[in-house]
Amino acid sequence: MKVISANKIRDIVSELCIRANLVLRKDILSGLKAAYSRETKRRAKDILKAIINNAYIARKEKLAICQDTGLPVVFLEIGQEVKINGNLMRAINKGVEEGYRRGYLRNSIISNPLSRGKPGYSPVVIHTEIATGNRLKITVLPKGFGCENKTQLKMFNPTVKISEIERFIVDAVKSAGPDACPPYVVGVGIGGTADYACFLAKKALFRRINRQTGHLPAGRQEQANRQTIELEQVLSREINKLNIGPMGLGGKTTCLGVNIETYPTHIAGLPVCVNISCHALRSATKVI
């Protein structure tokens, strides 16, 4: 049994908040550079160059990549052989507050969604999953609401054709248009219940974009993985045909990648959720 103090978790969450908001993920930066290389429209290239330069300046000067430092979503994978010494929820919220204060990051959380009020730093959204082993994996995803507001969920009939699911996902991006700061990363959750599909769609965002097939497990799981990867590739091509382009001014790249997460579901349903991220997709992870 591994014992981890809540104070240690607080300090790690604090650092992850700063890193996520100041240092753009390597896969996203690489995707932006690739988009710049293949772009032929002058205006689109200039916008992509500005986005890339912004990421470099943010890291060098220790400034936020975007002024909307989001509502931090914290994902925990807790090994069943881990014991937390202290109040875990309090430690996470305190860690976010300390990180945002130390990083001079904007506080954007209002305590009452109806009466609104003065923004603060907490409470944040926390998702917890139980895993095997004695490790604790913490991921912080600061989610800006220009893109979060474009989330869509649809409960399909189980008889639906794959082409109809593809159309729903493409149309979700099309309806977002320029409003959520493209080029996008599109997270998709398929299966489970309505709420779990939304969880999967957001979780998909902190997986690296443009994954390779690599070594897949044999049998039915391999077939399912290949089907998902093929669907990601089809959707990426179709979304990039929309010509929304960087910041909505046209161009070859409307999305940097599509990440799909699936889960078993009921025989009578097929939930699909689309969670879009702007070009400043920020997340940071640490394993204890």
Image (cartoon, rainbow, N blue to C red):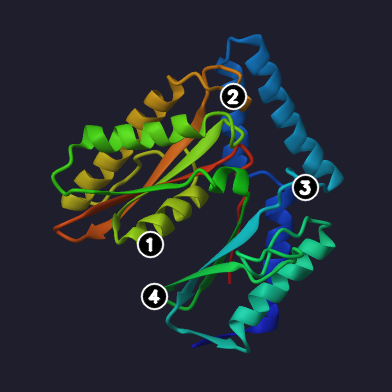
Rendering coords of residue 109 (x, y %) = 68, 63
Mark 2 is surrounded, within 10 Å at the Cα level, by few (under 14), some (14 to 19) or many (20 or more) other residues, namely some
Which label lies toward us, 3 or 4? Answer: 3
Q: Position of residue 114 (x, y in %)?
A: 61, 64
The x, y position of residue 161, in whole percent, is 18, 37
Q: Residue at x 74, y 26 (%)?
A: 50
Residue hosting label 1: 195
Q: Amino acid at mark 4?
A: Thr
Nearest to N terminus: mark 2 or mark 4: 4
Instruction: Look at the image and tell me in which quarter the C terminus lies.
Output: bottom right
Q: Which mark is residue 132?
A: 4
For the residues bearing labels 2 and 3, Cβ distance under 8 angstroms = no
User: Helix, strand, or loop for circle 1?
Assistant: helix
Kindly identify the amino acid type of the residue bearing the numbered disc 3.
Answer: Ala
- Judging by the rendered image, the residue that carries numbered circle 3 is 64
Is mark 3 in CB contact (under 8 Å) with mark 4?
no
Residue 220 lies left or right of residue 15; in this view the side is left
| Cβ atoms under marks 2 and 1 closer than 8 Å | no
Q: Is residue 230 visible?
A: no
x and y percent of residue 211 in the render?
A: 42, 40
Q: Dot 2: what SS?
A: helix
Return the residue nearer the eye: 279 or 122. 122
Mark 2 belongs to which amino acid?
Gly
Q: Residues within 10 Å of mark 1 (few under 14, many from 20)?
A: few
83 vs 226: above or below:
below
> Label 2, on which residue?
248
What distance separates the C-alpha of mark 2 from that of mark 4?
A: 44 Å
